[in-house]
């Protein structure tokens, strides 16, 4: 009888330990590789933010262009411009400037004219 209880306890312990060990391995694999390097998603996000900053910086350096109402989003080289500008010429200008930034593969220009006012 005592042997049955010991075997039962041993089987129960093994049955609980195996799924926990498997879960720990799966979650460790998603956080990076064995060297501790970040996953590609984190690296891509960092690169996307850097590209968006580069585009915004280039727009800010463009003479006569007000970048204050412009939002820049980048994803794998594809840049999306949104927000408002004060003249129609600036919509086209923003697209051209963004396309000229190193690393930009395409530009989606969703800029619109700012009409002023609160409503």
Image (spheres, rainbow, N blue to C red):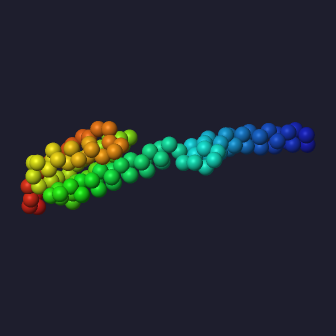
Q: Is residue 26 left or right of residue 118?
A: right
Q: Nearer the viewer, residue 40 or 53?
A: 53
Residue projecting furthest to the right = 2
Residue appearing at x 33%, y 54% in the figure = 53
Residue appearing at x 57%, y 48% in the figure = 37
Residue appearing at x 14%, y 50% in the figure = 90
Q: Is residue 78 left or right of residue 93?
A: right
Indicate the quadrant where residue 44 lies. Answer: top left
Indicate the quadrant where residue 115 lies. Answer: bottom left
Q: Quadrant of the C terminus?
A: bottom left
Whether residue 105 can be seen here: yes
Q: Position of residue 114 (x, y in %)?
A: 11, 54
Q: Position of residue 65 (x, y in %)?
A: 17, 56
Q: Position of residue 36 (x, y in %)?
A: 61, 49
Q: Is residue 15 left or right of residue 44?
A: right
Q: How many marks?
A: 0
Q: Nearer the viewer, residue 108 or 11?
A: 108
Q: Position of residue 59 (x, y in %)?
A: 24, 54
Q: Quadrant of the N terminus?
A: top right
Q: Nearer the viewer, residue 77 or 58?
A: 58
Residue appearing at x 82%, y 42% in the figure = 10
Is the residue 99 above or below the residue 61 in the image? above
Whether residue 80 can be seen here: no
């Amino acid at each position: 009888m005592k042997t049955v209880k010991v075997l039962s306890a041993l089987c129960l312990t093994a049955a609980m330990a195996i799924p926990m060990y498997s879960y720990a391995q799966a979650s460790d694999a998603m956080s990076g590789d064995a060297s501790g390097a970040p996953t590609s998603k984190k690296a891509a996000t960092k690169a996307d933010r850097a590209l968006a900053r580069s585009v915004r910086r280039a727009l800010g350096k463009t003479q006569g262009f007000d970048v204050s109402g412009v939002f820049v989003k980048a994803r794998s080289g594809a840049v999306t411009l949104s927000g408002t500008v004060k003249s129609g010429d600036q919509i086209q200008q923003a697209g051209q400037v963004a396309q000229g930034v190193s690393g930009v593969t395409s530009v989606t220009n969703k800029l619109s004219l700012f009409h002023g006012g609160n409503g």
